Structures are given as structure tokens and as C-alpha cells.
């Protein structure tokens, strides 16, 4: 991967200030809960990863979607 991501949460926000994405990392690997919200604050996708491998889709039906 090559990214130097500190352990913990990575959070991105919509232009209106509401949370857009929250992912947890262990090293440069997604590990734990990944949650995406729409601009109104509704959860649109929630996935669980272990060492960057998708292990559970909690909300949503497109677990490999990269875009908005």
C-alpha cells in the first residue's frame, strides 16, 4: 500500500461539516469498522474489516465501492 497512516481513525467530512467517512486502521490496513454517511448524517454503508479484508457488511450492498 505504501501509505503511512497512523493507527486509529481516519475521518473525512462533507462540505457542510457532517461526517462523511470514518475508518479505523492498524498500520496501513483497514481494521475494524468503516462507516459512510450521506450529507444529511444518515449511515449509507457500514463494513467491518480485519487486516484490510472485508469480513462483514452491516449496512449497504456495495462493499467494494470507492466513490461517493
Image: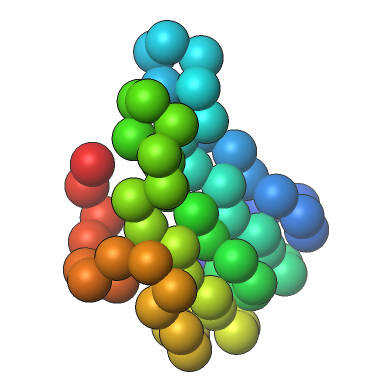
**Colouring:** rainbow
* x and y, in percent, of residue 23 in the image: 58, 55
Residue 43 image position (x, y, % from top left): 42, 47
Residue that sits furthest to the right in the current view: 7
Residue at image position (60%, 83%) is 51
Asked which quadrant contains residue 58, the reply is bottom left
List the single residue furthest toward the top: 16
The residue under the point 64% across, 72% down is: 32
Q: Residue at x 40, y 39 (%)?
A: 42
Q: Is residue 14 left or right of residue 5?
A: left
Residue 11 x, y percent position in the rendering: 59, 38
Residue 10 sits above or below residue 45 on the image: above
Whether residue 36 sits left or right of residue 60 in the image: it is right
On the rendered image, what quadrant is the C terminus found in? top left
Asked if one can make out residue 4 in the rendered structure from this viewpoint, the answer is: no
Q: Is residue 41 above or below residue 67?
A: above
In the displayed structure, 27 sits above or below 51; it is above
Amino acid at each position: 500500500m505504501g501509505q503511512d497512516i497512523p493507527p486509529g481513525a481516519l475521518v473525512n467530512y462533507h462540505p457542510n461539516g457532517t461526517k462523511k467517512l470514518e475508518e479505523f486502521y492498524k498500520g496501513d490496513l483497514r481494521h475494524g469498522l468503516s462507516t459512510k454517511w450521506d450529507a444529511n448524517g444518515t449511515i449509507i454503508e457500514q463494513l467491518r474489516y480485519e487486516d484490510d479484508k472485508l469480513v462483514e457488511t452491516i449496512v449497504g450492498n456495495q462493499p467494494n465501492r470507492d466513490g461517493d
